[in-house]
């Protein structure tokens, strides 16, 4: 167990690399997380990935914690910690240095331009995330209808999202999906 | 500025002058993180701008914009950047650990429970239902982010969005490859638009 074969090293490099391309936050990185964890490395099944997303949404804290669940499924508690730190540490350090550098050269206009150009990209990435998760979790018509209903209710009302998640859990538990 | 960040009635004069202690930073970020079901941003803004008055709404928006265009989980980036503005790098680490540590322990516990009971049929069914609803929530977040582009009739922005969606969601191309092409393209398009508007 050393070098490339060590699962902790593999977890670390995989997530550190993905985080650098996660423009628009953790939900924008989901397609890449899915591609690596399910299709490339076979760390988990489609269903386990969808479950990990559900557990991360059910838990308080930043959405990025889906990587904690992926890390745990690969290498237990150590894997959970390594995956989380790899996904969060390097980019937070980058943000720290950029913010210090920007506060020295204040008038810079390019953050606004960059922001305007990256917003459409991150929406596209999040839409792709939604598609991939629909394919992983909506295996029946009632399940798909539930997803559509949840999307409509969440868009039209200010209902606490936990109620929608709880409703989904109850319907699933009752065997209606 | 992201449109979801609404201005809050809080002027520069109200801002607290003394920097908070490391303990205060840690617990404040732990609290906003643990209250943040389905996203921490709302709670972070409430705690930082309204409750503790560590920043004006404008400073918060600026800091968030910076953390939003940089890669990685935005709110985690924000904790380190923001904490270090108040108390140097140690303060940044206190905020970072507070935001990430407690929920990470909790989720690790849930992962252990899932590893043991994930095959139990009732739990499988319930989680499947939760994930259907969770995907719906994600879709609604996409609609909400998209609506400013639709309102502004930002055709180029919408085209970039669709292209990225097709490349990643339909063609399942690797993310680094797509972004290395899409980021320069999108920046060029945005510059062209600004040039046109002058």
Image (tube, coloured by chain):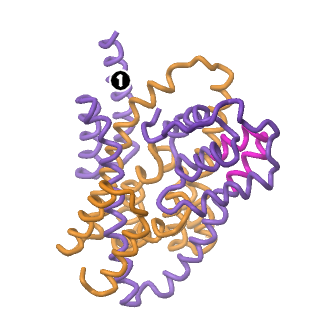
Chain colours: A orange, B purple
Query: Label 1 belongs to which residue?
Result: B190
The question of residue B44 being in magenta is answered with no
Whether residue A43 can be seen here? no
The magenta region covers B79-97
The quadrant of the image that shows the N terminus of chain A is: bottom right
Percent coordinates x, y for residue A56 in the rendering: 48, 66
Of B104 and A71, the residue lying toward us = B104
The residue lying furthest to the top in this view is B198
A111 shown above or below A136? above
| Residue B48 relative to residue B65: left or right | right
- For residue B97, which quarter of the picture? bottom right
Q: What residue is at 67 percent from the left and 62 percent from the top? A: B101
The quadrant of the image that shows the C terminus of chain A is: bottom left
- For residue B16, which quarter of the picture? top right
A168 shown above or below B33? below
Of A47 and B79, the residue lying toward us = B79
Of B49 and B183, the residue lying toward us = B49
Q: What residue is at 24 percent from the left and 73 percent from the top? A: A143
User: Overall secondary structure of the magenta stretch?
Assistant: helix
Q: What residue is at 29 percent from the left and 32 percent from the top? A: B157
Percent coordinates x, y for residue B47 in the rendering: 63, 50
Percent coordinates x, y for residue A50 in the rendering: 37, 69
Percent coordinates x, y for residue A106 in the rendering: 63, 20
| Residue B196 relative to residue B18: left or right | left
């Amino acid at each position: 167990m050393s070098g490339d074969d060590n699962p902790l090293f593999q977890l670390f490099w995989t997530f550190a690399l993905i985080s650098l391309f996660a423009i628009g936050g953790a939900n924008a990185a989901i397609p890449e997380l899915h591609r690596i964890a399910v299709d490339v490395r076979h760390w988990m099944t489609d269903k386990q990935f969808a479950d990990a997303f559900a557990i991360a949404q059910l838990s308080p804290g930043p959405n990025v914690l889906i990587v904690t669940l992926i890390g745990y499924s690969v290498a237990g508690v150590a894997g959970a910690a390594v995956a989380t730190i790899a996904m969060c540490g390097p980019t937070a350090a980058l943000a720290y240095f950029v913010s210090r550098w920007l506060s020295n050269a204040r008038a810079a206009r390019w953050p606004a331009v960059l922001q305007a150009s990256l917003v459409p990209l991150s929406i596209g990435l999040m839409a792709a995330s939604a598609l991939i998760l629909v394919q992983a979790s909506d295996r029946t018509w009632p399940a798909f209808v539930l997803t559509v209903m949840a999307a409509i209710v969440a868009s039209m009302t200010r209902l606490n999202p936990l109620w929608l998640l709880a409703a989904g859990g109850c319907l699933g538990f009752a065997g209606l999906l | 500025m992201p449109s979801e960040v609404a201005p809050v009635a809080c002027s520069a004069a109200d801002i607290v002058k003394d920097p908070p202690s490391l303990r205060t930073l840690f617990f404040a970020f732990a609290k906003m993180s643990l209250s943040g079901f389905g996203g921490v941003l709302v709670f972070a803004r409430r705690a930082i701008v309204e409750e503790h008055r560590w920043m004006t709404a404008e400073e918060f928006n600026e800091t968030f914009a910076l953390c939003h265009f940089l890669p990685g989980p935005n709110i985690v980036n924000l904790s380190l950047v923001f904490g270090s503005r108040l108390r140097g790098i140690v303060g940044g680490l206190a905020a970072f650990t507070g935001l990430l540590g407690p929920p990470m322990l909790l989720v690790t516990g849930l992962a252990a429970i899932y590893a043991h009971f994930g095959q139990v049929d009732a739990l499988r069914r319930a989680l499947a239902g939760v994930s259907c609803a969770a995907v719906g929530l994600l879709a609604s977040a996409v609609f909400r982010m998209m609506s400013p582009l639709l309102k502004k009739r930002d055709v180029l922005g919408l085209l970039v969005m669709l292209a990225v969606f097709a490349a990643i969601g339909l063609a399942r191309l690797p993310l680094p490859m797509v972004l290395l092409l899409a980021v320069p393209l999108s920046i060029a398009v945005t510059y062209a638009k600004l040039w046109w508007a002058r």
